[in-house]
Amino acid sequence: MPTTDCAHSIARVNGVALHTAAAVLTAEELRQRACTELLRQAAQAAGLLCAEDAPSADGVIGEQSAMAIEALLDDTLQVPEPSEDECRRHYLAHASTYQTGETVHLRHILFAVTPGVDLGALRRRAEAALLDVRSHDDDEADRFAAAARLLSNCPSAAEGGDLGWLAASDCAPEFAREVFGQTSMGVLPRLVHSRFGLHVVEILGRNAGVAQPFAVVHATVACALRQKTYVTALRQYLRVLAGQAVIENVDLDAEATFLVQ
């Protein structure tokens, strides 16, 4: 069962508490802690970490635990080297990803995720704002800027949400994936998720980048494919561990990153 109020329900993995009774965590923070604790216990079971290693009460594991988990994953996860054909196919399917110099002029309305925030209510507010700015004609008063000044949790609110011209490297990776390498203009039809929260995004202009030859980006493509395979293997392994564990007050069935802090 998802929970954001941990003062009433302690989340546990095999009886090990993931937080103190007074802590208030988001559902995603609970999932992250649960995944880390699953791996810590697996490292103990594999003899890579002493049985006396103490679990973390604040979500930050010690150096010995981190090294043991790393060794566990090195031993357990199989990440084959991608072939050149696989790399070429990925490059051709994601050619825009390997452009350089692309910039986008955008503005946004940020609904920030903060400790203790009601995620359901936050999403409803963000969805309402998205609907509002998309349902007005361009020749009306600048509805987007007004909404940004009123609602956005970003300093850019003072400028009507305008962030100016940005490169992908200026943005969080998960935000950049939704904005760069695309052709869409205007207000995007869905919310953009990032580590900072939920964004209503408007694209005001695009400057296309320059495509890089496959030979130049081959190593980068291979690295991207290895990382994708690694994340898939890690998620599968964590699901196996979760299926063998007693999980209390953490929703691991929801869409989650399943990545270790």
Image (cartoon, rainbow, N blue to C red):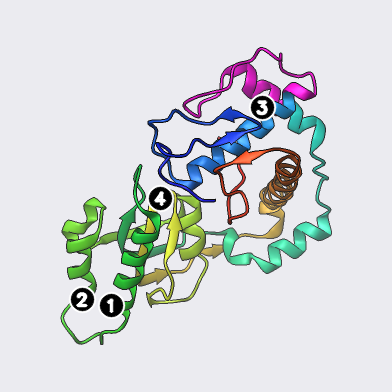
The x and y percentages for residue 212 are 61, 59
Does 199 sit left or right of 257 as displayed? left
Task: Name the one closer to the observer, 109 or 181.
Answer: 109
Q: Which mark is residue 170?
A: 4
Cα separation, mark 4 vs mark 3, equals 34 Å
Which secondary structure, mark 3?
A: helix
Prevailing secondary structure class for the magenta stretch in the rendered image: loop
The x and y percentages for residue 51 are 71, 15
- In front: mark 1 or mark 2? 1
Above/below status of 107 relative to 244: below
Image: magenta residue range: 44-70
Please give the name of the residue rendered at 69% of the width and 53% of the height, measured from the top-left corner.
221
Asked whether 41 falls inside the magenta stretch, the response is no
- In front: mark 1 or mark 3? 3
Task: Name the one closer to the observer, 157 or 45.
Answer: 45
Above/below status of 188 relative to 80: below
Residue at which label 3 appears = 40
Cα separation, mark 4 vs mark 2, equals 26 Å
- In front: mark 4 or mark 3? 3
Which secondary structure, mark 1?
A: helix
Three-letter amino acid code at disc 2? Arg
- The answer to whether one can see residue 62 in this image is yes
Three-letter amino acid code at disc 3? Arg
- In front: mark 4 or mark 2? 2
The x and y percentages for residue 242 are 70, 42
Task: Name the one closer to the observer, 234 or 228.
Answer: 234
Residue at which label 1 appears = 132
Toward the front, the furthest residue is: 8
Residue at which label 2 appears = 143
Cα separation, mark 1 vs mark 2, equals 8 Å
